[in-house]
């Protein structure tokens, strides 16, 4: 029986992925950890421990004591926050990954998941239908850490056989937990403000197209990749994932169809430069071919669910 460790269970992805993994592997077999408290449903449904992933001794203790076979390493500082504190963010993003890689090698952990991001691309990358293999010159601390991470995970696979798998997530959209300080966060905030105040001031300009993905599709893609037979994986860096590409203006139009008096204004801040350096759309044919990446949600379907669920949440 697999025993799974989730690091960063209280974040936007972890708060949902942990519960999905518990459904699949059994509540007691998925140990949730984070440096901050976990959501109530995670605390109530299975084991939780406070863990700073930089504390390699405690990490090793948990891995050995719990006989962990799979690790999902989700702890990181995202693009917007990382630009505010470059060196501490580099330290967290890189040292955490190196801790996991070293321990996975030594303790022969069966499988590891570590997410990369569209932030690995930069201003010299082709912006539309960005290919799997292309120019990669990221100019953000976060993007540089993700690109370095991709190189390291491939290295640990080739050199030591560590079976670590990765997706280049686009911006993730969800209603359970707030987004964690990224450039794509506007696409989550806008739904809360549309319901609370019927207006939103967007920190990106109206035509800033970015690839995004609704959380259920991201969770499914993550689990599908982790369950895929290793022989099907033709690459060991990180898979492009396209999701749905749209601009703030397009999202606002979609919300306005459902909340007619909703208004949006635009006041770009430092995150505009980050968005400008990222792809507008992604080519994910390699992921589709290798392990059958699929999506269920387009922009209208996602908007319906986001508005319904956030209305329920806010009462
Ligand atoms: P998040 O910020 O919402 O959650 C990260 C979690 O990690 C937080 O709960 C935080 O408390 C925890 N954490 C931070 N430092 C820690 C430490 N030292 N030890 C233990 N835990 C620590 O982020 P997220 O959106 O859930 O992202 C998860 C992963 O997915 C990250 O690697 C991120 O780069 C990647 N990713 C996310 C998106 C997105 O749109 N959410 C897109 C691309 C890639
Ligand atoms: C961010 O905006 O930093 C994240 C990401 C795309 O990696 N959502």
Image: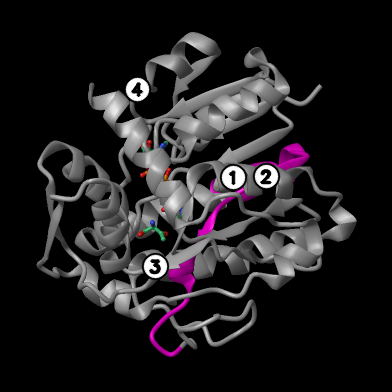
In this picture, residue 78 sits left or right of residue 58: left
Tell me which residue sits at (45%, 14%) in the image.
Answer: 43
> Mark 1 or mark 4, which is nearer to you?
4
Q: Up-down: is 44 above or below 268?
A: above
Tell me which residue sits at (14%, 68%) in the image.
Answer: 269
Label 2, label 4: how far apart the Cα atoms are: 23 Å
In this picture, residue 53 sits left or right of residue 180: right
> Mark 3 or mark 1, which is nearer to you?
3
Label 4, label 3: how far apart the Cα atoms are: 34 Å
The verdict on residue 116 being magenta is yes
Query: Which label number is shown at residue 116?
Result: none
SS of the residue under disc 1: helix
The verdict on residue 14 being magenta is no
According to the picture, the residue beneath numbered tag 4 turns out to be 37
Q: Are marks 4 and 3 in contact (CB under 8 Å)?
A: no
In this picture, residue 97 sits left or right of residue 182: right
* Residue 60, visible in the rendered structure: no
Q: Residue 88: percent from the left, percent from the top?
A: 29, 54
> Mark 3 or mark 2, which is nearer to you?
3
Q: Dot 3, crowdedness within 10 Å: few (<14), some or many (≥20)?
A: some
According to the picture, the residue beneath numbered tag 1 turns out to be 100
Magenta-drawn segment? 99-124
Dot 3 or dot 2, earlier in sequence: 2
Dot 4 or dot 3, earlier in sequence: 4
């Amino acid at each position: 029986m697999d025993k799974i460790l989730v690091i960063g269970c209280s974040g936007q992805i972890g708060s949902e992925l942990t519960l999905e993994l518990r459904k699949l592997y059994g509540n007691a077999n998925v140990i949730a950890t984070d440096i901050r408290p976990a959501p109530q449903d995670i605390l109530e449904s299975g084991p939780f421990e406070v863990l700073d992933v930089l504390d390699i001794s405690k990490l090793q203790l948990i891995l050995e004591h719990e006989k962990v076979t799979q690790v999902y390493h989700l702890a990181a500082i995202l693009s917007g926050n990382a630009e505010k504190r470059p060196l501490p963010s580099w330290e967290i993003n890189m040292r955490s990954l190196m801790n996991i890689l070293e321990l996975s090698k030594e303790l022969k952990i069966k499988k590891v998941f570590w997410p990369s991001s569209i932030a690995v691309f930069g201003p010299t990358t082709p912006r539309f239908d960005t290919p799997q293999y292309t120019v990669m010159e990221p100019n953000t601390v976060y993007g540089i850490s993700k690109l370095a991470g991709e190189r390291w995970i491939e290295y640990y696979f080739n050199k030591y056989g560590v079976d670590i798998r990765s997706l280049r997530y686009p911006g993730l959209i969800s209603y359970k937990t707030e987004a964690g300080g990224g450039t794509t966060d506007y696409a989550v905030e806008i739904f809360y403000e549309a319901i609370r105040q019927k207006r939103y001031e967007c920190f990106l300009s109206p035509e800033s197209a970015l690839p995004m993905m609704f959380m259920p599709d991201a969770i499914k893609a993550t689990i599908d990749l982790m369950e895929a037979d290793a022989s099907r994986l033709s690459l060991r860096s990180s898979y492009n994932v396209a999701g749905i590409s749209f601009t703030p203006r397009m999202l606002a139009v979609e919300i306005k169809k459902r909340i007619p008096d909703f208004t949006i204004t635009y006041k770009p801040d430092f995150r505009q430069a980050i968005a400008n350096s990222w792809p507008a759309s992604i080519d994910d044919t390699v992921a589709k071919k290798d392990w059958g990446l699929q999506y269920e949600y387009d922009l209208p379907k996602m908007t319906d669910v986001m508005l319904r669920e956030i209305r329920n949440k806010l009462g």
